Image (tube, rainbow, N blue to C red):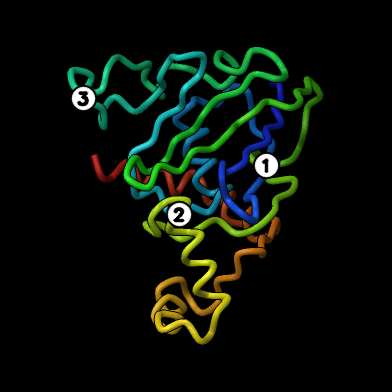
Amino acid sequence: MPIFTFHIKLVGTDPMVTRTFMASSEITMYELHHAIQVVMGWKNYHLYQFEVDNAVIADRRLWDEDEMGPITNVKDVSVGQVFTNVGTTAVYEYDFGDGWMHHLELVDHSNHPTKETLPKVISGDNACPPEDCGGIHGYKDLIDILKDPNHPEHSEYKVWAGKNFNPVEFSVDACNAELKKLPRHIKEYEKGF
């Protein structure tokens, strides 16, 4: 089973939120979506889509093709079918309201077997923004307010973001521990249908 290494970055964030992670080429794009949610630190509350070479890959159950256009269903295509060569890129959009755009690139692949549990994060930089903070501009405002203890909304934002929120903090170990729960996350998500 080929092992793919991906690099993903959350476009427009400052500090830049990035992750490098490994996944099997045999998982579906649906499973990749769930892995990205954990890898990045999202909560899987919103719609999402992948765009690869002007083709849209999304969950048919959440998509109105008459209104939003034709798609390929995420459950019908594997990661290996989409990412055919090192250097293949995709745009992963999460939360159409906040418009979080991620640049996803296949940076390496290996045919050597591994005993490691996949997916697995190799490295990462900075915390994921809190859900529903208003996209890039809202996140920038949040960071600025959290940096200024004299700002009139500082206390309110500190509570909203969580007292332990640190925009420059990311734990590979904590993320990998959460990735080990991925089958359970997917099962819980599926209960909503």
The amino acid on which the numbered mark 3 sits, given as a three-letter code, is Asp
For disc 1, the marked residue is 117
Front in this rendered view, residue 185 or 170: 170
Which labelled disc corresponds to residue 96? Answer: none
Q: Quadrant of residue 120?
A: top right
Of residues 23 and 125, the one drawn nearer to the viewer in this rendering: 125
Which of labels 3 and 1 is toward the front? 3
Mark 2 highlights which residue?
Answer: 137
Count of labels shown? 3
Which residue corresponds to the image point at 64% horizontal and 12% vertical from the top-left? 84
Q: Tell me the amino acid under the disc marked 2.
A: His
- Residue 183 picture location, percent across and down: 48, 44
Q: Is residue 63 above or below residue 97?
A: above
Left or right: residue 68 compared with residue 142: left
The kind of secondary structure element at disc 2 is helix
Q: Residues within 10 Å of mark 2 (few under 14, many from 20)?
A: few
Please give left or right for residue 85 compared with residue 133 in the image: right
- Mark closer to the chain start, 1 or 2: 1
Dot 1 amino acid type: Thr
For the point 45% across and 49% down, the residue is 184
Between the C-alphas of marks 1 and 2, the distance is 36 Å
Q: Nearer the viewer, mark 2 or mark 3?
A: 2
